[in-house]
Structures are given as structure tokens and as C-alpha cells.
Image (tube, rainbow, N blue to C red):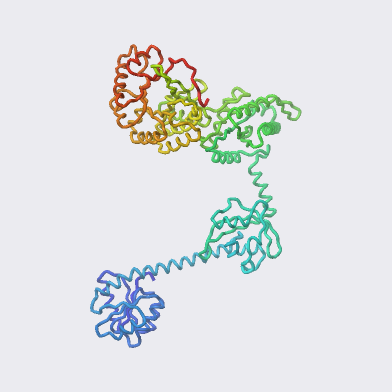
Amino acid sequence: MNSSHLLVIDSSPDHAQAVTSLLRNAGMAVRVANAANLGELKSYLQEFSPFLILVTTELPSTLKIGQILQAADQHSTPVALQISAADTDVIDEALASHSVMLINAEENDQLMQVVQQHISGGKSAREHDDLHLRLTELQHRYDLLLDSARDSIAYIHEGLHVYANRAYLELLQVQAMDDIEGLSLLELMAPKKGHNLKKLLRDMNRDIFPESSPVVTINAPSGKQLKAELTFSPARFNGEQCIQMMVREQDANSVLQEELDRLRKTDPLTQMNNRQTFTDRLSAFIDEERDTDTRSAVLYIEPDGIAELQQKLGMKGLDAYILDLANFIRGNVNDEDLTARFCDCGFVALIKRDDKSDMLDTANSIIESYSEHVVEVDDQTIPAACSIGLATLGSFTRDAEEIIGQATSAFKEAAQKGSTLVTYKPALTTVSSGETERDWVERIRHALNNHDFYTVQQSIVDLEGESEGLFENRTFMREEQGDSPASEFMLAAERHDLGGVIDRHVIPQLMAAIAGTGDRHIISLSVNSVLDFSFPSWFKHQLEETEAEGSQLILQVSAMMAEANLKETHHLIDELRNLGCGVVLSEFDNDRRTIQLLEHLPVSMVKLRPGLAQGLSTQKSNQDIIRAVVKSIEPHDLFIVADEVQDASDLSILWQCGVKLVTGDFLNEAPQVVGQ
């Protein structure tokens, strides 16, 4: 069936053999057969579906050309007619009623060309027939599976039934599809309060399908009433778009199923959520609240001295003690908080509050109240105490296991003291590489989650006495012992794509603080923000939100970074200039490549490299560098700033070198803090 067949109509089989030899020599794999009468012709057409019928000049006496063409039409088979000059009668007869191909009987090349053209067409036709047969078989199997399925399934179009399987008909207690074919869903079903079936159908016609399964009361044609859940999905039936509806009847089994589900999710002793349920719900909460400002934390709670309690109370008494603690925790958190028994003696709670202090107050209140609580077990009265580990959630929390692990880690530290609350903070070491840098990354993520970044504003003064109203802003990360400046953590942050996140955390607070003041502020940018092409549009949106003026902001990038990313820095400056913002190059010195940056980047200021403005009276080389920098920027009409000036005695030397704008500890001013 898969071979290519050519049928020759000739009074003798010799011509078919000659054609076979001709095609084989030309490299064509074709099976050639001969038909000398109408019966042979029809039989071959029926069995082999040849891609071409070749009628020779020696037409059998028992066959008319019209019979051949009529049989070929019935099987959609093309016909080629070999002719000679004397065959005009045959040509006229053939062309009188059909379109045929004419081949010069003396030209074998014409024959091979026609055969070559029709082999591929015949193959495509056979493949199409095979695919159609397979499709028909698949459709038959699908119909059989659908009709034998246990689920009740119907196809709906424009609110009417177009198909229903056997289970659906049995559910409605009808014999055949004809009994419901003209029945609308709106007549058959009454939705539960809160659902609008008409709107539901209208939405689904626009490919808007419900996420939940609506509950309806079905009024079957037999008079039977039943409650059921409906599940909808898009489908096609007989080539038309329609809706597949699956019906699940609600009965006494559903009540049992609900109770089984409840038992599966609940701790049997305390009737709190169990460990798996809490973890699942916490994971969902983290995914839902990842990009919001919700303040939330996980508390891990255990009673103090649990080993002694086990020996003193025994298993039964300890269960009573644990149940009492569970009830106490429930009574000291809000109704919307999520609590669970996490292990034999440990509990967890997900709490959501307006700010961080409220979360700490809740945890401390549990500890203090429980220390005043007395537990009665049988005839024993036992004083109570517990410790709590607290871990805050934020946009950088990875998953439920991480935050629970952090709360548990904090609890272990708290349990060493007893009746104590410890808030989780990752260990911090010096930034270098490998493990220690990973410690910094964890600390930065923790600080972002806990809003531990703040900015200190310091005045920049003019040595010639003019009031500039200009300030420098330095970012710090809050620590328990000595806060960390950006110089300590920003390198690690940028290597792990967190520098831009810190910028987007700090900058809106600064904008809100300076809006309407008229002052101008220098704000540092990380390499991540410079390379982020979405930063300018985000920055513009923040200006609009805070109502700050672009002219109030001068964004600072390091000269070394600008040199390494010249194209991206130029793009950023162009975007910021459109918003009215300026740009300052920091860490500037007399290096030739640094000075050449001014030929490419239209900045408004440069800031000297840190350390150049310190101890100038004894550092002649630093004076020479500063003078070289001042001379190099003269053609560009730029301001130059010296920061980290510690000694007022250096001011006169800076002024002599040509530096007018200075800032540093010599000011002895109380710094302004934003975001504390």
C-alpha cells in the first residue's frame, strides 16, 4: 500500500514491462501494472490507488476512453494519454468530457517527467488518507473513553447540551441525548447563592473560566433534585468551540471527605494546624506577599526546661502541659494569625502587624504573660516559662523552610537564657571571598527584609562662604554593634546583584525627605543600577510619586566603574539629564584615563578620591594630585568636591589648590538620618 503504483492501459502487457524498464533505468522505484479490460481497471484502482493511469496508443478493444476517465474520476486519479499524430479521434473523445494530460508516445522524457511530478502527489494523497484513518480511529477511541468514563461529562454550546456521556445521562435519569438536547443549563440548574450562572456562561464564551467549582442544585427532568459541583474547561466538538462540563455530585461521602481532610491537616492533641499544613500555608503566603510591604514574622515557641518537665510529668502529664500552652498561644495572638504545633513540644506562629515593633511586642507579651501563668496538671501546680525565636519575612525570603529554620536557630540562642526573645540575624564576618562573602549576602538579604538600611546626610560647604544648600548622603546597614558603611558591604552586594535592590530601597526614602526643601543632594548609585536599563524609568516614577524635583538630585557613580562601563554610563546620564538630574564622578584623581572620561561624559561635578584631602600639610604629593585634577577640569567648568576632610587645618590648603566645596568630620555637625 505504501509503494508507488502506475497503471498502464494497453492491449498487451508488454508495454507495461517496457515502462517498468524505462523507469527503473531512470532510478524511479515504481510498480507498473497492466489493465486490458474494465474489470481489471476497477479492481486495481480499488486495491492499489495508483498515482497515475497511463493510456497507451494501443487501447484495448473492450475499453472506451470515456470508461477509463469515468473510473479514474471516482478515485481522483489523474490520467495521461500517450498519443501519436493519428490519434485525433481518441483525443477528441477524451477532451469532450474530461481534462487529461497528453504525452507524445515517441518522447520517453515526457513520460518520465509526468511520472516524476505525480509520484510525490500520490504519496501525499496516501499519507493524507493514512492520517485521516488514524484521526478517525482516535476520535472513535476518544468517544468510547468519554462514553465509558465514570465522571459525568457534557459538552455545552451557547448554554445548550450538544453531547452528554452515559454517566451524565444516568445522573439526570434520562434514556438518551434526545431527552436533553434542547434543554438549557439555566433551566436545568439553580446556582448556589453568590453565583450567577448566566454571567458564568457569558464569561466562558469569552474564554474566561472560573477558578473555583460553582455549586448548583440540578433539577433533573425526572423530578430528582441533587447538589453538585461543576468544573468547566474549553473544548471542541464536531469542529466547533464549546465548553466541557464535569459534574460531581455532593452527597454524604463529601461530608466524610471534609472530615478526613480536616484530620489530615490538624494536630490531634491541640487541634491546631499540623507541621505540613503550616509549611504549605506559609509557602503560599510568601509567594502572595513577596512584593508587598506587609510586616510579618514567624515565631518559634517552646517551653523552657522541657527535659525536666518530661521526667516530672510523664507522657500523659506532658500532653496536658502542651495542650495548655497551645491554648495560651491561641489566646495571645490575633484571630488572623496562623498557629501550628510544629513538633512534640514546639509551636510556630505566623503573625502580621503594622510595623516591626508591634511584632516584637507580641512576642514579648507572650513571654511575659506566660511567665505569670500557672499550669495545673492533675494535682500539680507548675510555674510556666517559654522562649521564642523570631524571624522576619520580606521580599527576599526564599521559602518556608528557610524562615522556619531561622526562627528555630534564634530560639536555640534564646533557650540558653530562658524566658527570652531572640530575633534572628545571620552571622557577619569581614568581606573577602567564599564562605565569608556568602555570610555578607545573607546579612544584606536579612537587612532588606527588615528595613535595616538608612542614610546619613552631611552638609557640603563652600570655602568662599556661599550657601550652597548641598548635601552628601551615605548609606549604612544597621548592626547590633557598630553599623556598617556602604564601603564594607556594597562590593559583595553588587557581585550578587543586590546593589540595585539597595538603591531602590534607599532612594525613595531620600526623595520623600528632600521633596519641597529646595536643597540639592548627592546620592550614590551602585554598578547594578547603572547597568540596569529599567532604572531611569523607575527613577522617573519615584520622582512623580514623591513630588521631588529632578534638579534636587545629583547621582554619584565612581570613575573606575564609569571607565569600565562607558556606554551604559553615558546612556544613564542622558536619561537623567532629561529629568533635570546631575551626575558626579567620585574617586577622581589625576590618572590619564580618569581625566579622559570628561571628554565623553557630561557630568556636573567630580569628587576627589578618598584619602586625598587628609593630612595635606604633610602630604605634598597629594597636593600635587589635587592641583592636577583642578587644572584638568578647568576646560569643562565643573565643581570639585573634597570629602572625608577631618582636620580644619587642611581647608586653607584645599582652597589654595582650587577646591571650593568640602565636607567631612571637621564640621562637627549633628548628621540628619533618613530611614532610621
The mark total stands at: 0
Instruction: Answer yes or no: is residue 380 visible.
Output: yes
Question: Quick check: 275 left or right of 451?
Answer: right
Considering every residue shown, the one lying at the far right of the view is 379
Specify whether residue 315 is in view: no
Closer to the camera, 200 or 254? 200
Q: Residue furthest left?
A: 106
| Residue 116, above or below 198 | below
- Left or right: residue 76 compared with residue 182: left
Residue at the spot 71% in from the left edge and 62% down from the top edge: 224
Q: Quadrant of residue 600?
A: top left
Asked whether, in this view, residue 36 is left or right of residue 274, the answer is left
Relative image position of residue 579 (x, y in whole percent): 42, 34
Q: Position of residue 447 (x, y in %)?
A: 50, 29
Q: Position of residue 70 (x, y in %)?
A: 39, 81
Residue closest to the eye, 260 or 92:
92
For the point 58% across and 33% down, which residue is it? 296
Q: Quadrant of the N terminus?
A: bottom left
**Which residue in the rendered view is the most extreme toward the bottom?**
61
Q: Residue at x 43, y 24 (%)?
A: 488
Please tell me in which quadrant of the rendered image residue 43 appears. Answer: bottom left
Nearer to the camera, 577 or 200: 577
Q: Position of residue 529 (x, y in %)?
A: 41, 34
